[in-house]
Image (cartoon, rainbow, N blue to C red):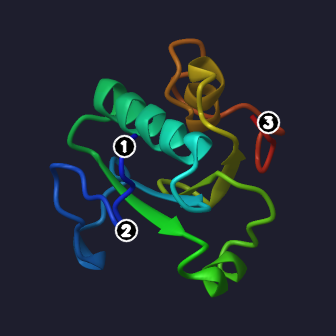
């Protein structure tokens, strides 16, 4: 079983606010411990980021069993939940992120819709 670290950083370091560009993806994955679904969500997220956003992302994993107060920050009601802080406005997607096409569409990086995410996907479950 893969161990979930408290915080994961991609190859690129997290930029300071003055250097944030629209190309950087600031992602936060909320999980509840090291459950199979949490591990699968993290593995799927890392794979998707490496395949589509190599060097342009930062992932923070928040274990709500260790930090329950953090759920209020992004109004988390189901787990696992992925929150995208940047680029553009905050968005959420719920589930283990195994539906690759849905995650890519949510993020606006799918080949079907490379410019923007589809309407009505904010906060939808996977």
Q: Secondary structure at mark 1?
A: loop
Q: Secondary structure at mark 3?
A: loop
The residue lying toward the viewer, choosing from 11 and 36, is 36
Of the two numbered discs 2 and 3 in the rendering, the one whose residue sits closer to the viewer: 2
Q: Which residue is mark 1?
A: 2
Task: Please name whichever residue, 118 or 70, is drawn nearer the observer in this view of the structure.
Answer: 70
Q: Where is residue 86 drawn, in percent x and y?
A: 47, 58
Residue 6's tag is 2
Looking at the picture, how far across and down is residue 67, in whole percent? 56, 82
Residue 123: x percent and y percent? Answer: 78, 50
Total marks drawn?
A: 3
The secondary structure type at the circle numbered 2 is loop
Q: Quadrant of residue 96?
A: top right
Residue drawn at x 70%, y 55% is 79
Asked whether, in this view, residue 5 is left or right of residue 42, the answer is: left
Distance in Å between CA atoms under marks 2 and 3: 32 Å
Closest to the observer: 100 or 15? 100
In the displayed structure, 90 sits above or below 73; it is above
Of marks 3 and 1, which one's residue comes earlier in the chain? 1
The CA distance from mark 2 to mark 1 is 13 Å
Q: CA distance from mark 3 to mark 1?
A: 35 Å
Residue 116 lies in quadrant: top right
Q: Residue at x 55, y 27 (%)?
A: 104
Q: Nearer the viewer, residue 33 or 61?
A: 33
The residue carrying mark 3 is: 119
Q: Which residue is at the far bottom?
A: 69
Residue 102 percent across, percent down from the top left = 66, 25
């Amino acid at each position: 079983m893969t161990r979930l670290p408290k915080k994961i950083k991609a190859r690129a370091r997290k930029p300071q606010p003055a250097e944030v560009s629209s190309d950087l993806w600031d992602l936060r994955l909320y999980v509840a411990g090291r459950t199979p679904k949490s591990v699968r969500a993290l593995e799927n997220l890392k794979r998707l980021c490496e395949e589509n956003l190599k060097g342009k992302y930062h992932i923070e994993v928040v274990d709500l069993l260790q930090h329950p107060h953090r759920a209020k920050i992004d109004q988390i009601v189901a787990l696992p939940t992925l929150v995208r802080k940047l680029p553009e406005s905050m968005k959420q997607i719920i589930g283990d992120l195994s539906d690759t096409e849905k995650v890519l569409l949510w993020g606006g990086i799918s080949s079907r819709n490379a410019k923007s995410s589809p309407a009505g996907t904010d906060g939808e479950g996977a």
